[in-house]
Image (cartoon, rainbow, N blue to C red):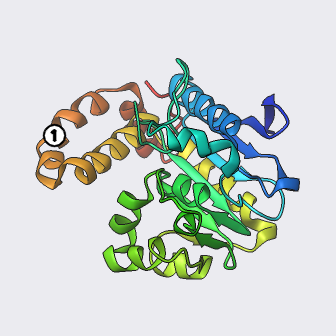
Amino acid sequence: MKAITCHTNEHFETQIYDHCLIMIFNRAEKYNAFSPEMYHQLARAYYHIENDKNLRCGLLVAMGDHFTAGLELEKWAAVFASGNPPQLGENEIDPFGVQGKRLSKPIVIATQGICFTVGLELLLNTDIRLSTADTRFAQIEVKRGIFPCGGATVRLPEQIGWANAQRYLMTGDEFSGDEAFRMGLVQQIEPIDNLHQAALELVDKISNAAPLGVQASLSSSRLARLQGENEALSQLFSALGPVARSEDAKEGVQSFLERREAKFKGC
């Protein structure tokens, strides 16, 4: 199926590709500098993914040579100075996972070129990450008189280790896509001319898997991460029951017996 554009404006675009919502930063002439308007557009896209039963995952990419140079700081200064996070609208889910409801469906991200501050924090709140070998990652907030407020201070130590994270959080130094891969921060390195195609192939695999199983797997993993291993283990079989009684579970068994690819419906 070809991608179908469902919403576009000056800086942000969404497309539906089979069961995936592709979210595209489209401000290449400004290095995809992240404005408050883009925050709310992305938050609405996350809400769309969560509430559209036909959508099973999301893919976040950017047009141009760079994923994002970071925040359009002059437009965010007043928000930060207020001491409060940006106010979410009724049909929005925070793409940083810092406030409000968390998205229950998986997000894949593909980054290239510069991926600073907000770009890295968006990545940290996704589930599978691709990048080019020479992607430039950095949290440079300490060089601008502030500190990361989109989750990096919590998630970067968790995902790459305490001292590794402080090495970059407290200096604002850069690290490459290759280094991010070595530390386990990204899962796949691709050349720039194949980056988005590789990401589409990955979301195809997620979309073709059983949606209830994918979401339950993500929920269990997240529960272990946030509330501990024992809590996640204690809920495994109570969470498994409804999934195992689903029509998709029956289709999974039938496709196995018939030696064919399963066709899941999310019910």
Number of labels in the image equals 1
Quarter of the image containing the C terminus?
top left
Q: Is residue 257 left or right of residue 65?
A: left
Up the image or down, 202 lies above or below 168; here it is above
Q: Quadrant of the N terminus?
A: top right
The residue singled out by tag 1 in the image is 235
Question: Could one spot residue 54 in this view of the protein?
Answer: yes
Res 173 → quadrant: bottom right
Residue at 64% x, 68% y is 131
Residue furthest right in the image: 29
Depth check, front residue: 29 or 78: 78
Q: Position of residue 212 (x, y in %)?
A: 40, 34
Residue 213: x and y in percent read: 38, 40
Image quadrant where residue 75 sits: top right
Q: Which residue is drawn at 83% across and 32% down?
A: 9
Q: Which residue is drawn at 84% across and 59% down?
A: 64
Q: Nearer the viewer, residue 152 or 181?
A: 152
Dot 1 crowding, Cα within 10 Å, few <14, some 14–19, many 20+: few
Give x and y (percent) for residue 180: 53, 75
Task: Tell me if I can see residue 261 in this picture.
Answer: no
Q: Quick one: SS at disc 1? A: loop
Name the amino acid type tagged 1: Gln
Quadrant in which residue 83 is drawn: top left
Residue 121: x %, y % from top left = 52, 56
